[in-house]
Amino acid sequence: MKVMCVFGTRPEGIKMAPVIKVLKNRPEIECVTCITAQHREMLDQVLDLFDIIPDYDLNIFEPGQTLTDITTKAIKGLEDIIIKEKPDVLLVQGDTTTVFAGALAAFYQKVRIGHVEAGLRSGNLYSPYPEEANRKLTGVLTDYHFAPTERNRQNLLNEGYSDEKIFITGNTVIDALQYTVKEDYIFENDLLNNIDFNNRKVILLTSHRRENLGAPMENIFLAIRDIIEKHRIAEVVFPMHLNPKVREIAYRILGQNPRIHLIEPLDYEPFTNLMARCHIVVTDSGGLQEEAPTLGKPVLVVREETERPEGVEAGTARLVGTKHDSIFENLDLLLSDEKEYEKMAKAINPYGDGKASERIVDILLKEVKKD
Ligand code: UD1
Ligand code: UDP
């Protein structure tokens, strides 16, 4: 069986890497990897860590491309490779524009499609944008839906997909996390080694969503700046996304405070070890909403909706929106009330047990033979 894995951004790389590892270890499978490189540096960091040398690199990255640029370049580049390789099945992961383009290119060649991390829904087509649409569009084209949780399966059933083609596997991000987090980890970055994680309350911040660019992101950063002024014990580490629109707002609002560290994106290994040592996570990221509960870190989700309500229901995540006062008040509570903090700081694992990749590959072997 020939499986072609297509991915393009940092989070897809992180979550596809454990699947590729399993695929490459199975003698009955030939695994071909193709990156669109919708991201460049941020994806290359992941490839290095997981020792993935892609068979094909479309290298479509250009700073500031539009969604149409990314979509059209990816479909065109993938067409030739799919025709040449003739895979039995093409795997995509998640909800980026590369995912939708990969699924569409495979569909045009009548190649079967497996969607890893299928069935997540926020219920609002414009939030996250364009990811909610990418997920739904990809679902329509998919033959094998690998749903991380029961809720994700239900979402697909509600949209009329056949139960026979939906498989609950857990999320492969948990497989990846198990590979990187270590108790005795030492950072290469001296700034991080010099932070006194035991006596300071370190807030790990990330923000990059398109629908937050502009006023919502300004509100998030203003709330962070104000909370740092109020709580002398708190420090912020913000590994900034490479999007220049994010960085401009970050430097303008957060650039002046010695207890706010604006740093370059971290490799996955130091990043997850930083998360394991921090006190609170504030984020609009999808992946962090899965990783923080797993590591027992309270996570304030600075978005209006989430397609990952499992962490909220378990009490580890709180959806606080993008208004200044709500973010400030929730942070204030967690920094001043030990009981409130302890209520949220519990390790839960609704997203998987670290064996999702093995399951996905086992199911693929069985299902592709059947079809
Ligand atoms: C993309 C995905 C989003 C995912 C996110 C993960 C789409 C439309 N968006 O968003 O779903 O959550 O990745 O991070 O698929 N840049 C660089 N170097 C890099 C990466 C990005 O310089 O390695 C800069 C470029 O200026 C680029 C900008 O960031 O134009 C935005 O990148 P893009 O891939 O368009 O969207 P993201 O916001 O990263
Ligand atoms: N991440 C990383 N380095 C960083 C910031 C994030 O390796 O500096 C990882 C993080 O652990 C998670 C993934 O990148 O697995 C999330 O990526 P991002 O927030 O860009 O995308 P999303 O998950 O929102 O699609």
Image (tube, grey):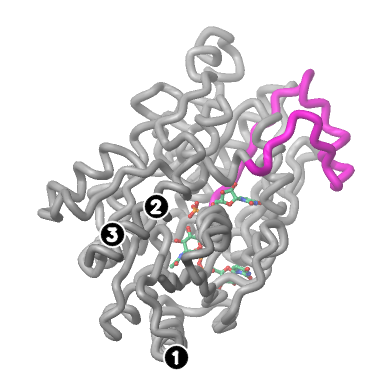
Q: Rounded to the nearest whole Å, what is the CA distance between mark 3 and mark 2?
A: 9 Å
Helix, strand or loop status at disc 2? helix
Give the residue number, with chain letter if any, for mark 2. Answer: 362
Q: Residue 59, image x and y in percent?
A: 59, 82
Amino acid tagged 2: Asp
Identify the residue at image location x=50%, y=79%: 65
Q: Position of residue 217 (x, y in %)?
A: 51, 50
Q: Name the residue beneath numbered marker 1.
A: 84
Q: Earlier in the sequence, mark 1 or mark 2?
A: 1
Q: Secondary structure at mark 3?
A: helix
Q: Earlier in the sequence, mark 1 or mark 3?
A: 1
Is 270 contained in the magenta span? no
Q: Which residue is mark 3?
A: 367
Disc number lying in front (1 or 3): 3
Q: Residue furthest top?
A: 339
Q: CA distance from mark 1 to mark 2?
A: 26 Å
Vertical arrangement, residue 15 with respect to residue 108, above or below: above
Helix, strand or loop status at disc 1 = helix
10 Å crowding of disc 1: few (<14), some (14-19), many (20+)? few
Location of residue 322 with respect to 234 vertically, above or below: below
Q: Residue furthest front?
A: 28
User: Dot 2, crowdedness within 10 Å: few (<14), some or many (≥20)?
Assistant: some
**Local crowd at mark 3 within 10 Å, few (<14), some, or many (≥20)?**
few
Q: Are marks 3 and 2 in contact (CB under 8 Å)?
A: no
Between disc 3 and disc 2, whose residue precedes? 2
Residue 55 placed where, x, y %?
59, 79
Residue 312 seen in render: yes
- Where residue 64 sits in the image (x, y, percent)? 55, 77
Dominant SS type (magenta) = loop
| Residue at point 50%, 71% (across, down) | 30
Magenta span contains residue 197: yes
- The range drawn in magenta is 179-208
